[in-house]
Image: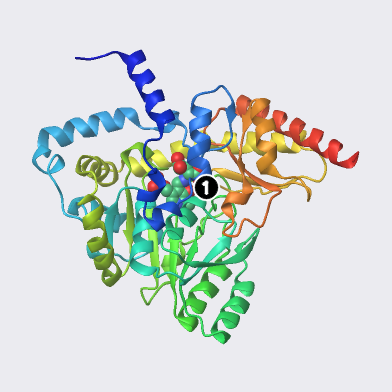
Amino acid sequence: MFIGVVEVEKKLKKKLAAKPLNFESFFSEKALGMKASEIRELLKLVETSDVISLAGGLPAPETFPVEVIKKITEDVLTNHADKALQYGTTKGFTPLRLALARWMEKRYRIPMSKVEIMMVAGSQEALDLLGRVFINPGDVVIVEAPTYLAALQAFNYYGPEFVSIPMDHDGMRVDVLRERLEELKGKGKRVKLLYTVSTFQNPMGVTMSLERRKELVKLAGEYDFIIVEDNPYSELRYSGEPIPPIKHFDSEGRVIYLGTFSKILAPGLRLGWVSAHPHFIRKMEIAKQSIDLCTNTLGQAIAWKYVEEGYLDEHIPEIIEFYKPRRDAMLKALEDFMPDGVEWTKPDGGMFVWATLPEGINTKTLLEKAVSKGVAYVPGEAFFAHREVKNALRLNFTYVPEEKIREGVKRLAEVIGEELRKSSSQ
Ligand code: PMP
Ligand code: G9A
């Protein structure tokens, strides 16, 4: 018999208070070492309050092509239900992989066959697969400082030694990378993997320059490592000239490219892809078998029609048109309200601006004050493998409308201004 929500809640409270088991003693060492993603935790908070969220990297729901998805779904269920509702192969729905191979070739001039593509449940799944397939405990993994925090979270499970390379407005400092590679070589340490978000980086919004891309591929050849190029944002360009992915310069199969439908269709479909040498794909395919057998087939069939029938190419300019004013509104508000001493990036695309506050301000502790004033951001610390930077923060400009962006930045500027006055009077 159903006992009712209130009764269930009461029972749960009792259960949580009782602690009859030593829960921790059951977890594996690896599970004990897991840390929650700051973004995912913040999302919970913001979901349930009326705080202006400049935190999570959420696309605007207004950009979801709902009518197109309805139409395609009808078509898929009328004509392809046998495949779309069935288990699929682990590598993914072949017509979609073919369509993506053609799209990658057309868009980025990267010749690609379907055997070089595997579908995944969002590129986040690919990050975990990479950890499984490549990282032994203690292996050196090179990352940008800062970098996408959920990539750190995914790799961290496998126990790597992270080596961080600083960033500037042209992306990863490839000159510093060369020095680090030499040092590591001198110590007899092999670098296997380097992870980069090459275009409109998460969290900084900056893009690796063409020269650095070429130099990076050269270094990968010289020092024999693999580059993981995570590229969810390059289609969201609001200004400046497009730049080819690093994968475009890869003649040896050293670049593993991650793509996703999250920012060009909808993240709820949980659909991404890996493009890599078939040898790497095969190992990742085996690793994926035990995780989820295959990626959501209905979603893949929808994405197939979306790419194949040209909806994707039609939709990208619409998303750009929608987000550009939001990017502009954020940059204008920062200019208008931020106190002296605060600096920020001016991205040509993507979803994020990165702000650096004067030394001594801790953005993690400041967050509580900001939330109490009705605005949220992601503290910068979590984007560093060694958590060495405390005075930076990430702002998202795609989720809330222009007037809220302006109001959110204004509130944040007031909180920062107050903190600066407080620290100068001490
Ligand atoms: N990589 C980067 C750099 C991201 O910013 C994100 C999402 N914010 C992901 C991977 C994961 O995206 P998804 O799993 O939705 O494809
Ligand atoms: O965790 C999510 O919901 C995806 C967003 C990632 C980000 O904010 O970087």
User: Which sits in the foreground, 22 or 202?
Assistant: 22
Q: Along the line of sight, which residue is nearer the eye, 282 or 231?
A: 282
Crowding at dot 1, Cα within 10 Å, few <14 / some 14-19 / many 20+, comes out as: many
Q: Position of residue 337 (x, y in %)?
A: 76, 33
Q: Is residue 245 above or below residue 51?
A: below
> In the image, what residue occupies the spot 45% across and 64% down?
159
Q: How is the image coloured?
A: rainbow
Apparent side of residue 221 relative to residue 177 in the rendered image (left or right) = left
Residue 249 horizontal side relative to residue 200, left or right: left
The amino acid type of the residue labelled 1 equals: Arg
Q: Position of residue 266 (x, y in %)?
A: 37, 38
Q: Which residue is mark 1?
A: 237
Describe the element under mark 1 as helix, strand or loop: loop
Q: Is residue 8 left or right of residue 374?
A: left
Left/right placement of residue 73 relative to residue 414 reads left
Q: Nearer the viewer, residue 237 or 201?
A: 201
Q: For the N terminus, give its image quadrant.
A: top left
Could you tell me if residue 130 is visible in this image? yes
* Residue 298 image point, x, y percent: 20, 40
- Say above or below: 372 vs 72: above
Q: Position of residue 218 (x, y in %)?
A: 50, 78
Disc count in the image? 1
Q: Quadrant of the C terminus?
A: top right
Depth check: 26 or 228 in front?
26
Residue sitting at 29 percent across and 46 percent down? 307
Residue lying furthest left in this view?
82
Which residue occupies 56% across, 21% down?
50
Q: In the image, what residue occupies the spot 30% across and 52% down?
A: 120
Seen from this angle, which residue lies furthest right? 425
